């Protein structure tokens, strides 16, 4: 049974990759992920704000449309205790590379080109095998066009690609007006892979304190549908690797991700909730499923249910919308 896959040129022993999360905050934790069966690990993100703290507190894009509020800066956490500092992050990558045999993928989270991107080069020098860019941007300025929003992503990617030689993946938001066009432009700027999708953590209201409150809600299996659809649509139309990172909780989710066209299935919420042992269990279930259906390799199934390969390609477009609504019957 061949579970191997290749992602951004990295040879992986299977398609299960823990995504960026607190699970990579220590060498011991990274080692436990490897022992449980992870084929690579995406490090938790190094934030732009951590790197640029010494020169300024909040970058222009983050303060854009909020600089008229005197309270704006008070909402941000103490940056000195925000995960760990840049130097410790680089040290953790070095130590992890010595401790494990699986690839280590660094993660940068930011929104503006600039000196902080120098850390992409330093992450490469620390030994990272690849880099994931997580551009978390909420456009609030009514004067800003969709094309200008897209340029934020493209500018960051161009600068990072100019700074490193290791593969670079772009973690995307699902909110572009034309996902295929944006994917094509990112490929044109040098992206080696697209990770679908970043989860935007919307704030909540605390009715007791009358404050805006951050609320972390882990992903659920239903969130797989959106990245599944887009990977299936894009597969074969763009010569780039895909990863699905939302809604992966069980073996069936991994199978669907692969059949849509993803090279790897990334997961964090399931591991945070139920432990790293879930990697071992999912891999066992994956092997059993493949054996029962006489699949000899993971590569056989990659893209097999993509839009280009299914009998009814319109199932990914308006026909699906109409069919779903027509088939629904309310409970009497």
Image: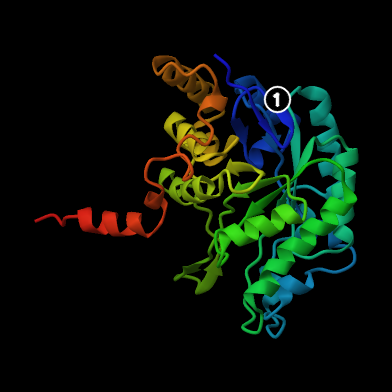
The residue most toward the left is: 332
Q: Residue at x 71, y 52 (%)?
A: 187
- Residue 122 x %, y %: 89, 45
Using residue 69 as the reference point, say whether residue 234 is left or right of it.
Answer: left
118 sits to left or right of 168: right
Q: Which image quarter holds the N terminus? A: top right
Residue at figure coordinates x 21%, y 53% from the top left: 327
- For disc 1, the neighbor class at 10 Å (few under 14, some 14 to 19, many from 20) is some
Tell which of 164 and 119 is nearer to you. Answer: 164
Can residue 68 be seen at all in this image of the molecule? Answer: yes
* Residue at the disc numbered 1: 31
Q: Residue at x 58, y 17 (%)?
A: 2
Residue 137 in the image: above or below residue 308: below
Q: Quadrant of residue 323?
A: bottom left
**How many labels were placed on the picture?**
1
Location of residue 14 (image quadrant): top right
Q: Quadrant of the C terminus?
A: bottom left
The x, y position of residue 319, in whole percent, is: 33, 56
- Relative to 255, does residue 287 appear above or below in the rendering? above
Which x, y percent locates residue 129?
Answer: 80, 35
- Disc 1, SS: helix
Q: Residue at x 66, y 69 (%)?
A: 75
Q: Horizontal placement of 232 versus 36: left or right?
A: left
Image coords of residue 10 (percent x, y)? 73, 31
Q: How is the image coloured?
A: rainbow
Residue 65, above or below 212? below
Question: Is any part of residue 134 visible from this angle?
Answer: no
């Amino acid at each position: 049974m061949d579970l191997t896959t290749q992602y951004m040129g990295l040879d992986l022993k299977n398609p299960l990759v823990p995504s960026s999360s607190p699970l990579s905050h220590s060498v011991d934790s990274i080692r436990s992920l490897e022992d449980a069966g992870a084929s690579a690990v995406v490090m938790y993100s190094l934030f732009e704000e951590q790197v640029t703290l010494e020169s300024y507190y909040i970058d222009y894009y983050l303060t854009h449309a909020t600089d008229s509020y005197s309270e704006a800066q008070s909402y941000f956490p103490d940056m000195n205790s925000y995960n760990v500092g840049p130097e410790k992050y680089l040290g953790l990558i070095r130590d992890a590379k010595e401790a494990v045999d699986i690839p280590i993928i660094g993660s940068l989270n930011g929104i503006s080109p600039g000196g902080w991107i120098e850390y992409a080069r330093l992450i490469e020098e620390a030994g990272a095998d690849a880099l994931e860019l997580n551009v978390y941007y909420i456009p609030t300025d009514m004067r800003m066009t969709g094309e200008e929003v897209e340029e934020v992503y493209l500018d960051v990617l161009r600068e990072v690609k100019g700074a490193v030689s290791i593969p670079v993946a772009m973690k995307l938001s699902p909110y572009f007006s034309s996902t295929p066009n944006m994917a094509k432009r990112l490929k044109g700027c040098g992206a080696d892979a697209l990770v679908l999708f970043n989860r935007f953590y919307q704030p909540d209201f605390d009715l007791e304190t009358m404050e805006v409150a951050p609320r972390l809600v882990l992903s659920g299996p239903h969130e797989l549908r959106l990245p599944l659809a887009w990977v299936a649509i894009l597969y074969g139309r763009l010569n780039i690797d895909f990863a699905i990172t939302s809604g992966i909780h069980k073996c069936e989710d991994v199978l669907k991700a692969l059949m849509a066209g993803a090279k790897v299935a990334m997961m964090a919420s399931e591991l945070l909730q139920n432990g790293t042992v879930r990697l071992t269990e999912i891999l066992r279930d994956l092997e059993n499923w493949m054996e029962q259906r006489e699949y000899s390799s993971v590569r056989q199934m990659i893209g097999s249910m993509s839009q280009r390969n299914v009998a009814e390609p319109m199932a990914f477009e308006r026909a699906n919308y109409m069919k779903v609504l027509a088939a629904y019957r309310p409970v009497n």
